[in-house]
Image (cartoon, helix red, strand yellow):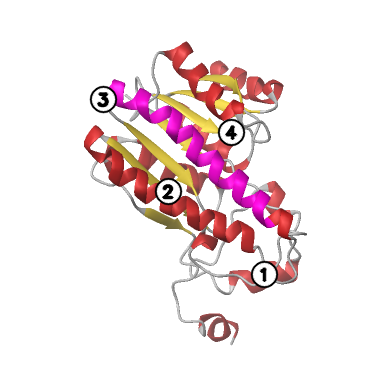
Amino acid sequence: MGKLDGKVALVTSGTRGIGLQSVKTLAENGALVYIGARRLDAAQEICDNLDSLGYKAKAVYFDATKEDTYKTMVEDVVKDAGKIDILVNNYGSTDAKKDGNLVDGDQETFFKTLDYNIKSVYIPCKIAIPFMIKNGGGSIVNISSIGSILPDLSRIGYCVSKAAVNSLTENIAVQYARDNIRCNAILPGLIATDAALKNMSQEFIDMFLRHVPLKRFGQPKDIAEAVLFLASDDSSFITGETLSVAGGYGEPSPMYGDDVKK
């Protein structure tokens, strides 16, 4: 038996990286997983591959640039499956070229980043929670970032938006705990997705890893296993938490990286 047998899950932006691995891990543990995606052809291919392995997944339309799809995505899941037990808000966006520091960063990009990254959690939760209440409870897992708690020299919009996701998580957890709805956030460190790796020089990689006590990048599976933990009854007494999955990044003294280099 799987940890999620009989459960219905929705993962937003589930066709690549952390989202894709979360879809696979939840499905492998018995859940019927809906993939919220703009490219339905790519999502359907993933569903077909999982089906060939004996797992269950379906595609639903979700486009972060079209606000109405935040609502219809959840409603389509409930219409098809009859319920929703698990919501994984994985979508997040940033424009690294424009999202700089306060003075030099692009103001329009700052507010656009906040808009997308907060809405993509707020609206799906707002729509899903009434269905979860009718079903007797549920688990919401929001993908935040280690940057939400560690100030950076750039990416101010991304960091602030993810800090807001943390606060949303805590408020939702408190407001709906009596309805048996749990809400937690995962704070990934630097995860070795294809998109991340192709934008990093070897110099940056060497520098960054000096500040990670576990001495490696995270893998999508590291985050997906944390998603599984928070989605399942293994974490039935955990809510309102922000779980860092970053290899210890940000934990040591700021002198740590210099000591390791020596």
Q: Which mark is residue 168?
A: 2
Q: In which quadrant will I find the N terminus?
A: top left
Query: Which residues are the magenta region?
Result: 110-135
Task: Please tell me whether residue 181 belongs to the stretch shown in magenta.
Answer: no
- The Cα atoms of the two marked residues, 2 and 4, are separated by 21 Å
| Quadrant the C terminus occupies | bottom right
| Mark pair 4, 3: CA separation | 26 Å
Q: Is residue 169 above or below residue 70?
A: below
Q: Secondary structure at mark 2?
A: helix
Residue 90 can be seen, yes or no: no
Judging by the rendered image, the residue that carries numbered circle 1 is 102
Q: Are marks 2 and 1 in contact (CB under 8 Å)?
A: no
Nearer-N-terminus badge (1/3): 1
Element assignment for label 1? loop
Labels 3 and 2: the sequence-earlier one: 3
Q: Amino acid at mark 1?
A: Leu
210 sits to left or right of 78: right
- Which is nearer the eye, 78 or 262? 78
Mark nearer the N terminus (4 vs 3)? 4
Whole-percent x, y for residue 10 in the image? 48, 28
